[in-house]
Amino acid sequence: MTIADFYDQRVAQEAEHLTQLVISDLVSGAPNLAGGHFAAVVSSPAGAGKSYLVTSIAGNARDFTGGEGATIAVAAPTNDQAFGLVASIAERFPNRPVAFVPAQNRSLPVATSARPNVISIPSQAAATYPVVVGTLDKFGDAAGRGNLPHFRYLCIDEAYQADAAKYYGVGALADRHLLVGDPGQLEPFTTDDPGRWRGLPEDPTQTAVQVLLRNHPTTQNHRMPITRRLNAEAIGVVESFYPGHAFSSWTLPGVRRTRLVPGVASGEGARVDAALDLVAAHGWAWVRLPDTPVLTADPATVEAIVGLLRRLGDRAPEVASERTDGMFEPLGPSRVAVVVSHNNQKDILRAGLDGAGFDEIRVDTANKLQGLEFDIVIAWHPLAGLPEGDTFHLDPGRLCVMLTRHRHGCIVVGRASDPFLVDDLPPASDVWLGHDPDPILDGWFTHSMVFDKLAPFAVDF
């Protein structure tokens, strides 16, 4: 089989064209900020390969600047994200030195630091390296102390997870900025009272991208047209999180397949098998438990999820994809995950799965699984059994993370009453002067759209 049998070449070419356009803009785009500065944004859907874009730009930075001095600072919100960037750049460009500026008492993973083109340096030594990677906090602290040089470019990965305060701390490092991120994911957490800042143009608790676009509306916002993680069947539901952003799967319809041995035709197990058959055939299943208010860590939901996973194992699941050259291979438990909203849900599920012998299946909150991918995912819906929606559970970013971790299929588990929480008038929320997003209202509309799109895949337990 050839690459044409697996991939949509039109989508791949559009993505490559965008990459070249972004590089061209970063290098030679006309200044669009005060003082002759330049900034651009790249917004991507889940699994688009945005970190691949960042590493491409970082690895080629020397080529489009002549290779002199401090070329590009590559920053990310967390240490793990920065570690991943160092490893990716070093692996793809083994002849390019990659310098990492560590925070105090933090160091690169051993496998990454052992690469011959990777070096950890103090911030004062950054001027001699073409690519310097660090966290936003570390760069901001070093810049405030005057310990970093002036770079030609600043590239921020996961910029929608970075609050504006961190962006302010690194903005003076370079005259030309590129912010790359996923607008559908969870926004940065803050312990500060957002009411102190809401509506203000320089609100430090908003994302770096939101504040940039609010204050500089001429900033180019490129939208990546591709998702590499999600299959074609997932797009209809997932596009609810990306209004106005058209994108397609890199893989052709039918390339990713899930195969199960036949299920039972009747009895209690037929409903479980019906859900598994739906996710195998269409990539989605929505399991609706009976309508009743429940505790956050609901034992009945745990029992349903464990039962689904037990039956999935009984039916000898196999998956085929571009990674297997179209051939079916057994679905291993490490390629299955359960995503939840709360730690107490994780704990009770972990105990239930371990008791059933499923210790290799990953169970974690949306915050912890953000950025990861699996073949099959079970999502414990945030609104499951709640008496009413609130800011936390209506957060569209949390639901987006839950429904975008899978390559083959996702089973959503909730209560039959969940859609009623978003089936009437939108909830009342505070109104603030100035341009300001409303997470409660945004979440209400997003959840409503997702329920409508999941309806054809519903199974009542």
Image (cartoon, rainbow, N blue to C red):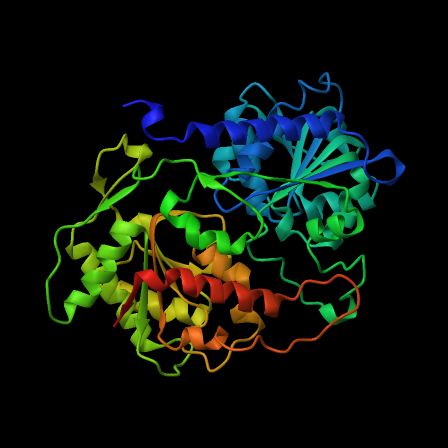
Q: Quadrant of residue 349?
A: bottom left
Nearest to the observer: residue 58 or residue 104: 58
For the C terminus, the image quarter is bottom left
Residue 305's place in the image compared with 5, above or below, is below
Tell me the residue at 56%/57% (across/down): 186
Nearest to the observer: residue 457 or residue 166: 457
Whole-percent x, y for residue 365 in the image? 45, 61
Whole-percent x, y for residue 303 in the image? 27, 72
Residue 271's place in the image compared with 165, above or below, is below
Nearest to the observer: residue 8 or residue 45: 8
Count of number-bearing discs: 0
Tell me the residue at 54%/69% (across/down): 444
Whole-percent x, y for residue 434 in the image? 79, 64
Residue 43's place in the image compared with 37, above or below, is below
For the N terminus, the image quarter is top left
Q: Is residue 92 left or right of residue 457?
A: right
Regarding residue 402, the answer to whether it shows in the image is yes
Nearest to the observer: residue 370 or residue 446: 446
